[in-house]
Amino acid sequence: MDKKRFSRREFLRISALTTAGVVAASCGAKPAPTATKPPEVKPTTPPPAKDVVLEAMTIDEYQTQYQEVWNLFNSKNPGIKVETFAVNEDMAAAHNAKVAGGWLPAIELTTNLLITANKDNYQMFLDLSSFDFPWWDRFTVDMKTAWPNLFKLPGPRTLDIFQGIVVTWLYRTELMEKAGFNPRKDVKTWEDLKTLLDEGSKWAKASPDVDYFWDQAWHQWAFSEGFYGYTIPLAFADGQRQRQNDCWLGKAKFNAPDSPYRHWFEFYKEASDKGWIPERMWTRQWEPDMEGSYIGGKSVMMLHGPWPWDKMQANDPSVKQTGFPSTPPAAGQSTWIQGAYPPAIGGGWFLRTGNEKTERWPQIQTAWNWFFSPGAVPLRAQSEGRSVGYKTDALFELKALQFQEVLKGIETPGGAFENVKWENAMTGDMLTAPYLKKGAKGPFDWQSNNDNLYWGDYLGGKITLQQVLDIIQKNYEESYEPIPA
């Protein structure tokens, strides 16, 4: 396969007003009138035109890469200058306050603002079909109609090029070898995985230079439906995405004895009780504690998305990393399934309403259309290390480590994980989004971080699994309007 490779270097590029002379009137007696030559008027030079500056949001971890992508646009579009700004989850409130105060950025991203376009807020998102956009047929999902068809409202309101987030195991090779394990060779089943975590944790406890074998910390969204919630149950025959979706659609109960979500909670309870994860994990911070210990060589492995692979490589390119798919099959499950969040419908990049009324609207359209063009998409994919649902002009292969070490081998003949199957169907939260009541908490109540309460109480032994699932079912029943059968 002919693969076109891109590097960052390939896309990096490197008033005076002259006044006319003034003739001063002379004082004193007036001379006899004579024919005079008009004064010479020198041509004026207008001041150089200033660039129209557009602000484009990025995820905090990838601001440098995205500024490099936009620098290519800047070099090809004199008169327009796109400058990036980064927002992380804990910065969302400050960003929203700034916007409420009158700031109108050109291009924004829902991801770290913890929002999606829905029936209550869609008017703050500009209708992306209201201006000329030439690339709709490039997307492998019908981005032009998916959101309008789901919500029965005009749109679309957001746009994304990426396959959904993929959560896999990753580990530092030198530490795993020092511990004496080879998960890519030895882990074939769910029981194999638990054996690795048990024996690895015992090794870490006896090793003075390592704090944890598997490090885990708290993140309110990661412990909701979108990260671990849609991932862990896939190890089990009765935990597949369709059964998860049945709970969201009202065809099954979150708190039923055979709830697909019970596997997720039971796995973390066992991990907490047996010391596979840090004590009181729910009190630890995601980036400074968990990611920091991994990057600092104090832990061996994590269950994470693509970002820490890149952070580790940026911190120390000499450190070798690899990993394996997240959910080897449990007893009764014949196939190893790797979950992926589906392409965002209602999430991704957006243009806030009001931009179309500004003088810079033509420049915003130019920048937006370039950002989603076949020339820009491969650069963006390389920047984030994520697969795309987009037809480019040339084949290219991601250089990102998670892709190279794990994802590339899934369902690929001869690949490291050729017998592992993808699951990236629509998820329950997407399917039921049109019926979510305004201001509702949703089943997992994560946006307010209230999921920390029941997770902490459950892992700490204060409440039972049934009580946790009862909370989730009650939240669900309070959050949705009747969903058609």
Image (tube, rainbow, N blue to C red):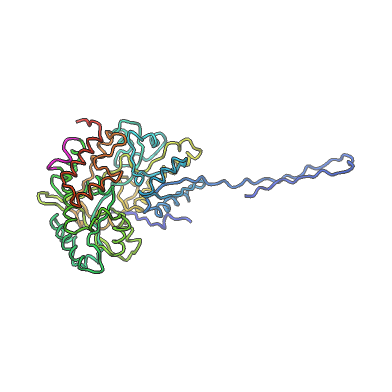
Q: Quadrant of the N terminus?
A: bottom left
Numbered range of the magenta stretch? 250-258
Task: Residue 319: name its quadrant.
Answer: bottom left
Q: Position of residue 203 (x, y in %)?
A: 19, 66
Q: Nearer the viewer, residue 129 or 233?
A: 233
Q: Position of residue 108 (x, y in %)?
A: 40, 44
Q: Position of residue 131 (x, y in %)?
A: 42, 35
Can you see residue 370? yes
Can you see residue 372? no
Q: Nearer the viewer, residue 129 or 53?
A: 53
* Residue at figure coordinates x 37%, y 55% from the top left: 6
Q: Is residue 320 left or right of residue 203?
A: right
* Residue at figure coordinates x 35%, y 47% from the top left: 112
Q: Position of residue 325 (x, y in %)?
A: 21, 54
Q: Is residue 372 above or below residue 480?
A: below
Furthest-left residue in view? 332
Q: In which quarter of the image is the C terminus?
A: top left
Count of numbered circles in the view:
0
Q: Is residue 227 magenta?
A: no
Secondary structure character of the magenta stretch overall:
loop
Q: In this view, does 98 lie to the left or right of 162?
A: right
Task: Residue 304: name its quadrant.
Answer: bottom left
Q: Is residue 453 left or right of residue 81?
A: left
Q: Which of 383 and 430 is in front in this view?
A: 430
Q: Nearer the viewer, residue 219 or 423?
A: 219
